[in-house]
Amino acid sequence: MASLGHVAIGLAVGRGQGKSRDSRSSWILMAFYSLLALLPDVDVIAFRLGVPYEAPFGHRGAFHSLTFAACVGALVGTVSALRRKPWLSYAPLAGIVVASHGLLDAMTDGGLGVAFFWPLTNRRYFLPWTPIPVAPIGRSMFSGYGLSIALTELWMFSPLLFYALYPRRASAINSAPD
């Protein structure tokens, strides 16, 4: 994926969780969940380290697994609890957002699939429906083909982006005359 879909998920979840009208806290949540949605792609570093794509720590391997998503959710929950934040709302959402990365990647039409069940198995899976075109990795993303993939994702995820980025109306309390 070109990552626009991952970012759209993070933005939408952050927007949905941002209950206050304070736009600063909403944007912080949207940025936080967008970074979590992109986190599994930290495994592209493996290419530089000579780790083969199909290895457990190769691309779409361990970092795309449900185990990794659960661990990130637990970590976010722990940090939230230590900071006296509502950990019960942050932890599951963080895990779901990270897990969404693997689910979206399993909906692409290329690559080797996603190791959902690592460390139990390194078997890679695709979902039965693969409507998302696979994006090139690295500098190739800036090619004409990469741009076409990005535009396709922009179109596919536009409802989530619209929801996340559409300006909120001022509350009736804030706009009432004195």
Image (cartoon, grey):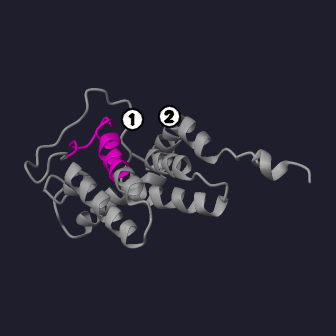
| Residue 173 at x, y percent in the picture | 78, 49
Q: Is residue 112 left or right of residue 143?
A: left
Q: Earlier in the sequence, mark 2 or mark 1?
A: 1
According to the image, label 1 marks what residue? 132
Asked if 144 appears above or below 52 in the picture, the reply is: above
Queried whether the magenta region covers residue 150, the answer comes back as: no
Q: Nearer the viewer, residue 20 or 76?
A: 20
For the residues bearing labels 2 and 1, Cβ distance under 8 angstroms: yes
How many numbered circles are shown? 2
The image quadrant where one finds the N terminus is top left
Element under disc 1: loop
| Residue 112 at x, y percent in the picture | 20, 43
The structure residue drawn at horizontal position 84% and vertical position 49%, both measured from the top left corner, is 175
| Residue 30 at x, y percent in the picture | 53, 56
The residue furthest left is: 120
The image quadrant where one finds the C terminus is bottom right
The stretch of residues the image draws in magenta is 95-114
Element under disc 2: helix
Tell me the kind of residue under disc 1. Answer: Ile
Asked if 41 appears above or below 113 in the picture, the reply is: below
According to the image, label 2 marks what residue? 156
> What is the spatial separation of the Cα atoms under label 2 and label 1, in whole angstroms?
8 Å
Q: In the drawing, what numbered circle is on residue 176?
A: none
Q: Nearer the viewer, residue 128 or 95?
A: 95
Q: Residues within 10 Å of mark 1 (few under 14, many from 20)?
A: many
Asked if 57 appears above or below 159 in the picture, the reply is: below
The residue furthest right is: 178
